[in-house]
Each structure stands twice: as C-alpha cells, then as structure tokens.
Amino acid sequence: MRYTRLGRTALQVSELCLGSLNLGVRADDQESHAILDTALAHGINFVDTANQYGWQKYKGYTEEFLGSWFALGGGRREKIVLSTKVGNPMDDWPNESGLSARHIIASCDASLRRLKTDWIDLFQMHHVDRSAPWDEVWQAMEFLTRQGKVRYVGSSNFAGWHIAEAQENAARRNFLGIVSEQSVYNLVTRHIELEVIPACLRYGVAVLPWSPLHGGLLSGVLRKLTEGEAMKSAQGRAAEALETHRETLAAYEDLCAEHGLDPAEVGLAWTMTRPGVTAPVIGPRSVAQLESALRAAHLILSDEVLKRLDALFPPIGKGGPGPEAWAW
C-alpha cells in the first residue's frame, strides 16, 4: 500500500480509505471483522465512519462496532487514522444536529465513548450549517483540539465557496482549519471539478471521494443484472440512475471487457488519477470486494483508456451531466 500526506498536513494516510457504512449492517459481524483485519494487514491505515452510521439498527451503531474492533487490541487503534463526522441529526430534539458549539462538543464526546478511544484523528463536518457562524464552529473545534480529543478537522459535501469561507475565517484565528473534503465523485458525477477541487487545490485540502463507483453503477452492473448477481445497484434510486445511464454504462462495460479490465477496478482507479484526490472512500461488503479495491489501487490506466473514459463520461461543460445526475 502506498501512503500520501493528508492535504497540506504531515499526516500520512493510505491511498485507500476504508469506509464503514456497510460494516455490521450489510456485512455481518464476522465478515466485517474480516474486512477490517484484511484492510489493516494490507496496509490500509485510514478508516472513515460517522456518528449517524448504522441507522438501520440505531444511530451510533457503526461507531460502537468499530469500538469493539479496536478493543480487540493488537495495535488496531494505534495504527489507524480514524475519521468520523458530526452534523447530521442524531435525534429529533433541538440541538441534536448541525454545527452549534454545543452539538459539536457533545457529539465528539459521544463518538469517543462509542469508539472506545481517547482521540479522533479527523473530525469532519458532515454538511455545512448555514445557521452556524464560523467563529462559533472554529471556537468549538479549537477547544477540542486543545483538549487533545481531535487532531484535524475536515468537511464533507461542502461547496467550493464554503471551503474558501471556512479557510479564510480559520486563518484569521491562526487555526489550521479544514484539511480534507469528502465529496461524491466518480465518472458519472464530476461536478466537483468545477469549484470544489480548485478550492481544495488552492487551500491544500485533501479530496476524499465518496461513492467512487456511484452506488455500484460502475461495478459492472449490467453484467451482474444479466447473471442475477446485482443487489444494491438494481434497487430503488439506483435503479432509476441505472435507466438514465444504461447506454453509457453498456459502452463502459464493453470498453473494460475490450481491455480485459474489471469495471469496478477501472472506476476506482480512475478516481485515483484525478488532481487533488488523496484517497477514495471505499465501502466493501465483503473481503472479495476489498481485494478488488486493493487491485485497483495498483492499476495503471493507459492514456487511451483515460481518453475514452472522458469521451463516455465528459466533464461538465463538455457535454457531461450536472449535479442532478446524482440521484441519492
């Protein structure tokens, strides 16, 4: 596994980030522990979660699951760069969501208890909170970093101007500010190339693409449907997105087959070629899917393949779809 710096920081993270959305939920406990252990054995040291994950059982479940894995010892916690998130509603009561100082600090303490750890390496704002002044947000984050509970602060689903506004306010306080931005980014949805990635490059913010396979649509979904293997990609909103992009996806899968490549590995490898990208966030439901991602991390796409991918999935402004292409 190769390592890179997280944005402008000195922190070293693996070029794949293991997302935990499916752990203990779509993957059972035994498979989930195997995924975590296999990832660590292959050098993945970057694990992402959120306080809300595991909502299918109850909010906070996934953090608790990771905490039980850390509790097994063997240096698991010490080796991992751990990221979690704050901002999404945890309850219907007032002050149980958003980025008020009260909620940021209370959420951090609750996440630490669930994760069975003393510190969070990367504490990410899950969404921008337009009602929260940046002075209030940064005061709370500064408090947590002084306490040693948080090492770095990141963002998720921010617009480019949100990143710029946050950084300029942090700079006035002599605070490091945002070091990473987690955005949906893949061949089908490229709108962050317009403003988010330029802002991240300007401010030294790492780009962490989530859903690099667009919910499974880039994993060879048409072949899987034919063979009766597709699950998530053939249901609900994914089915609607599939119909919108069926013709392009067919050409994409043909291109991969022509070069003897796996569509899932091509889609993931493509994100790793993009300017500003530090580590795509993968969400395997099995060890086999994790192993596919590990192969993708070492896959070098030829100039010909990259050119044809751009023709199939053009950037916005060159015939590509706008943000509404993401239907989740």
Image (cartoon, rainbow, N blue to C red):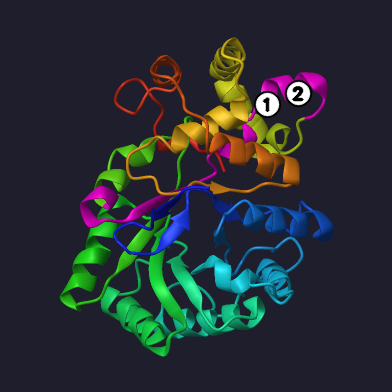
Above or below residue 195? Residue 176 is: below
The x and y percentages for residue 287 are 74, 46
SS state under label 1 = helix
Q: Is residue 327 magenta?
A: no
173 sits left or right of 219 in the view: left
Assign the C terminus to one quadrant of the image: top right
Q: Residue furthest left?
A: 172
227 sits left or right of 19 in the view: right
The x and y percentages for residue 6 are 38, 58
Q: Which residue is mark 2?
A: 225
The numbered dot on residue 221 is 1
Q: Amino acid at mark 2?
A: Leu
Q: Amino acid at mark 1?
A: Val
Residue range (magenta): 200-229
Residue at 61 percent of width and 67 percent of height: 52
The x and y percentages for residue 74 are 69, 72
Answer whether labels 2 and 1 touch (C-beta < 8 Å): yes
Q: Is residue 213 magenta?
A: yes
Above or below residue 75? Residue 236 is: above
271 sits left or right of 25 in the view: left
The numbered dot on residue 210 is none
Above or below residue 227? Residue 106 is: below
At label 1, counting other C-alpha atoms closer than 10 Å, the crowd grade (few under 14, some 14-19, many 20 or more) is many
Q: What's the CA distance linking mark 2 and mark 1?
A: 6 Å
Residue at 41 percent of width and 21 percent of height: 306
Q: Residue furthest bottom?
A: 147
